[in-house]
Image (cartoon, coloured by chain):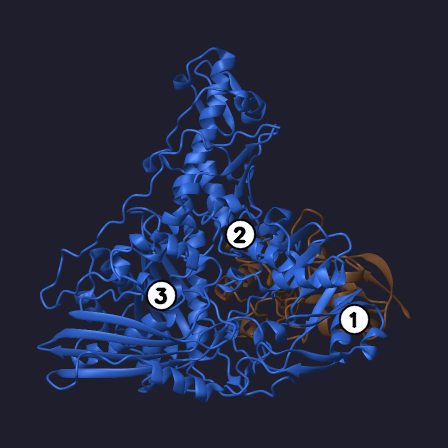
Chain colours: A blue, B brown
Amino acid sequence: MATPTTRRGFLTFLVAAPTLTVATNLTADALPSLPAPAEITDLGDLLILAGTPTANMLVLEVTPDGEVRFQLPRAEVGQGITTAVAMLVAEEMDVPVSDVRVSLSDARAELLFNQLTGGSNTIRSVYGPVRRTAAAARARLVAAAAQQWKAQSATLSTRDGSVVAPDGRTATFGDLTAAAAKLTSTITAQPKSEEQHRVVGTSQPRVDARAMVTGQMRYTLDLDVPGAMPTVVRRPPTINGSVRTVDDSAAKAMPGVIAIAVVPTGVAVMAETFGQAIAAKDALEVTWNRGTVDELSDADIKAKLRAATLPFVVPPLLTQHIDGEFDFAFVSHAPLETNSAIADVRADRAEIWAGLKSPIVAKQTIAAALGLPQDSVTVHVTQGGGSFGRRLFFDAALEAAQISKAMRRPVKLMWTRVDDMRHGRARSASHHKIRATYALGQVLTFEHRVASVETDFRHGLGEILTATAAHLPVGGNLSFAQTVFLTTVKVPYHFGVVTQLLNEVPLRMHTGSWRSVYSANTRGAEEIMVDELAARLGKDPVAFRRETLKTDRQRAVLDKVAAAGEWGRTMPQGFAQGVGFHDEYKSCTACLVEMDARDPKNPRVIKAVIAVDVGRPINPLGVRAQMLGGLTDAISTTLRAGLHIEKGLPLEGSYSQFHYARQKDSPPQVEIHVMPANGEPGGAGELGVPAAVGAIANAYARATGIKPRSFPITFPVDFDPFPR
Amino acid sequence: MPKYTFSVNGKPVSVDVPADMPLLWVLRDKLGVKGPKFGCGIGVCRACTSHLDGGEIQPCVTPVAQAAGKQVTTIEGLADGDKLHPVQEAWLEQDVAQCGYCQPGQIMAAVALLRRTPSPTDADIDKIENVCRCGTYFRIRQAIKNAAQKM
């Protein structure tokens, strides 16, 4: 089997120094703002920088039957990166996309910081290295043909998986792969110039779509690992509670039950089927020790956040000003595939299967928990049924390993939906204070103070930021959270003196980054204030954004939605348009929605028009899919989806209670315009949420006359909570 | 334990399980039919949606006893060999799936809708309650409309 790998010849790859982007085309009546930290170096730059030393340690194989296999050290959870990467490989090697198989790498500790899937950074970070790797493989195949034919490589071309000579001779890559692997000379190659691209930039359906629509796609729980039997965990009545006593006499006698074990997170039950495991788990008699936030409810959390919100600098005395305060509830990631993992732990080794966005940290943590050397723990990354940030953590993988060790059996662990919603992670609740001052038609200052329950970044991000913090041009000794905040969130407008500050309240709850991390709430609230500022200044919301945005590229997406969405058209009573804008991940987007809010308690987004500039779209069809997902997330979290915390536990336990949007909440009209390529690829996965949050909230305000201040807007406890 | 005999995707099967065991676990854990997915266990996410004698069911809340003597169809049984069902074709044309986990249930719900209502309106499509956490609803809607035209 030929395995031409590609370290050789590519050690010179360097990430270009982050470039300073300052607007030069200021319109007359906007007071310029200094660049925000995120405009100089954003989180993605830091992730790329940290991954650079190992960026080219990629594995590409050409099989004798001509299939190109590429191992991607990232997680696929629906965002479409396996398709985009297959396109990059196909482009460079002149093979059909259908001949490229992209698989997910096992945890590879040698990759150091280069196996984290987050920050909408996959395409940004692999665009160069994947193309270089594929170009190198192609060059070696061409060189092998040249050697066989005693020809010059430069005279040969490649087409459809074959090398072609000027005289018409051809040899397939499959036929050449063994010879190519034996070449000893150093062969250098450059990726194609972007003008030559024929695949990249065209819409390609997902490579795994057929498997998905025929039920053949295999997720973690669908794998058949010998001996791994269905297992669930009885969990405490409050977050982080622990087992005091267990009476398992009834459970043990139930049909199908195989094993019961106490682990740090609860009592694990294994049975022949999940149905039996769940029934036996419910039959356990367990008493519990207290958790870490037992007395805490929403009102307490809100009070803590308000108390932690840092003061403004500018007093509201000398100028005209506008203030706004906003609250956002906790939100479950709620991927449809709950936390799940398979673990086979033996005395001297362990093997793990799970959807993991930080598999190296998972491997290290699991090895430490089991008392095994890291090299003895193999971690396989399976394709995940959604993530939205959740699978940055490996809670189920660690727990499955602990259960397997305790039971001395392979384990197939599934969290129930109630487990996943109540004991899984969530986006932290946050409180926002925004003050803008203005005079003579322009904004003089714009201050935003954010207080948030601490977001857990202990999935390797801290190490990455430590390794790269020296490269941050601003900020000094920032905490990890503040670094993430300042390298992701920025006001895209010239609003004079702009300051954004985050303060976190540490509460021992299960939190984690949720699609766009701080930006959905922070930028969403800011977009509401932009509309309110525009109203104060007597300006149209689109016109006001247009004159204060910093770049022409930003204005172009705004103009696109205003034109395509017929901004300003007359709407009946109770209906309204709303607009929002966001710039992050070196990409920017505008969103225009139309809302039916005749019943203010039951508003519906009936139309959405989105424009998106990702610099260089690899797969416009995939980019549109991500923007559609971001829109639906924004509809959900702005209007109805959140978690109520009561006495140390979320009340919501399933989709009948956590109101993530359904078809009836989704607009029957959606247009998504992808702007033409104009630079390097930016990120897309999380980009869609913040602008849509702003647009939806603004449409609601315009339709109802009610200023939205607390999210989700409609948030009653309209259900009987499940027992604890 | 009682023995239940029924067909799954056209093949007869017999299982020895308690009468109240949800069909989902019989399919997945006893018979190795992995297309129907677990998402909630209470019939609200509908990721497991399948058909019983052609009608829509949620196997996670359907006791196995109810399937006795009947025909169970899961996503795996929808295509005719390599020839996909028009709804599956429409799903590919719209590139509906993202993570794909809910899509077997979405497709089975759409097929059931089109059987009841061959030309569904937007209001008819709105009644499908299957959760798609990736938020692909608009593409689902388009795919259902396109499939309706084909069928």
Give me the residue at 58% from left, 47% from top: A106
Which chain letter matches label 1?
A
- Disc 2 residue type (three-letter): Ile
**Residue A258, percent from left and from top:** 81, 66
The residue under label 1 is A276
Quadrant housing residue A292: bottom right
Of the residues tagged 1 and 3, which is closer to the observer?
Answer: 3
**Residue A447, percent from left and from top:** 23, 75
Camera-nearest residue between A707 and A294? A294
Q: Secondary structure at mark 3?
A: loop
Which chain letter matches label 3?
A
Q: Secondary structure at mark 1?
A: helix
Considering only vertical position in the picture, is A343 above or below A304? above
* Residue A200 appears anywhere in the view: no
Considering only vertical position in the picture, is A341 above or below A724? above
**Residue, far top:** A150
Of the residues tagged 2 and 1, which is closer to the observer?
Answer: 2
Whole-Å distance between the Cαs marked 3 and 2?
23 Å
Which disc number belongs to residue A479?
3
Quadrant housing residue A417: bottom right
- Disc 3 residue type (three-letter): Ser
Which disc number belongs to residue A360?
2
- Disc 1 residue type (three-letter): Gln
**Residue A171, percent from left and from top:** 54, 20
Q: Secondary structure at mark 2?
A: helix
Whole-Å distance between the Cαs marked 2 and 1?
34 Å
Which chain letter matches label 2?
A
Looking at the image, is mark 1 or mark 3 earlier in the sequence? 1
Considering only vertical position in the picture, is B83 above or below A408? above
Camera-nearest residue between A197 and A311? A311
| Residue A133 falls left or right of residue B42 | left
